[in-house]
Image (cartoon, grey):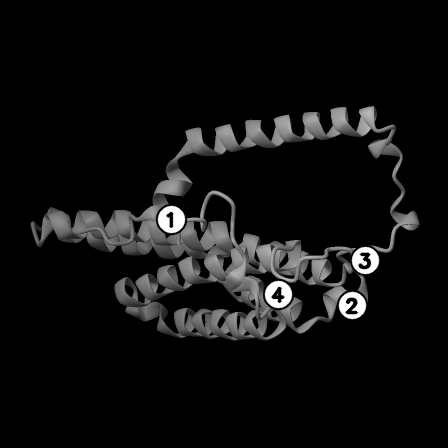
Amino acid sequence: MREPRSEESQDLRNKEFWDELSDVFALTWELLYEIAEEEGIDLDALDDEDTDYLKLDDPEIENHPVTKASEAYFESSRKWLDSYHEVFKEKAQEYSDLVKMNINPEENTNNTLILSDLFEIINWYHTMIFVKAKRAVMSSFDTWEEDDIQNDANGTAKVVLKCIERSSFAWNGILKHMPEQEDVALRNLANLTFLKKSIEEYFPDAEKFIRPGFDENI
């Protein structure tokens, strides 16, 4: 049974889904510009210097504990992913040799596919975690949003929590299928755990945020 080939993996492989999502984003921007034009607002003329928003590279954002924790995970996972091709190649060859020797051929073929899924999950989410964590921190400095729960900071922080959950699942899979990678797997799991605790501390209402289309029925 290929447990790792779950919702995470299916999302990654569903090109049609992402293409459709891209079209939705494009249409949303078109509608936004149309509405702005009707209201006499020139979106292209908006100057960042005329707003009170912080930028992603401002010290308040860069030095925030959540940003630092997400950066620590990004760096540790990125370093490992840079060499993953060679690591995966060696492990895939190991399983291939077992298949050739007719040693649990079905299981070892599945193991190769499982590892591929695990790497895809880690690779996809490690960047998203870093970017979204900084976005959540930046949004937390905005004071214009009236709702204490349904706001961009909580919504983005909840996305990060979901990314952490899926990434932790993948690293536990690496721990199971590649015990020789125990040190790096445990280090990344520790970084994810620390980041999760940081988000829960600074965004205590993140889990209460209702994501349209995802959480209404929960």
Q: Amino acid at mark 2?
A: Glu
Label 2 with label 3: CB-CB less than 8 Å:
yes
Residue at x-position 14% and y-position 52%? 107
Query: Mark 3 and mark 1: span between their CA atoms?
Result: 33 Å
Front tag of 4 and 3: 3
Front tag of 4 and 1: 1
Q: Amino acid at mark 1?
A: Glu
Give the SS element for disc 1. helix
Give the SS element for disc 4. helix
Residue at x-position 57% and y-position 71%? 204
Residue designated by label 1:
8
> N-terminal of the two: label 4 or label 1?
1
Farthest residue, direction left: 102
> N-terminal of the two: label 2 or label 3?
3
Q: Amino acid at mark 4?
A: Glu
Query: Mark 2 and mark 1: span between their CA atoms?
Result: 33 Å
Image side of residue 211 versus residue 84, left or right: right
Farthest residue, direction right: 50
Tag shown at residue 60: 2
Query: Mark 4 and mark 1: span between their CA atoms?
Result: 22 Å
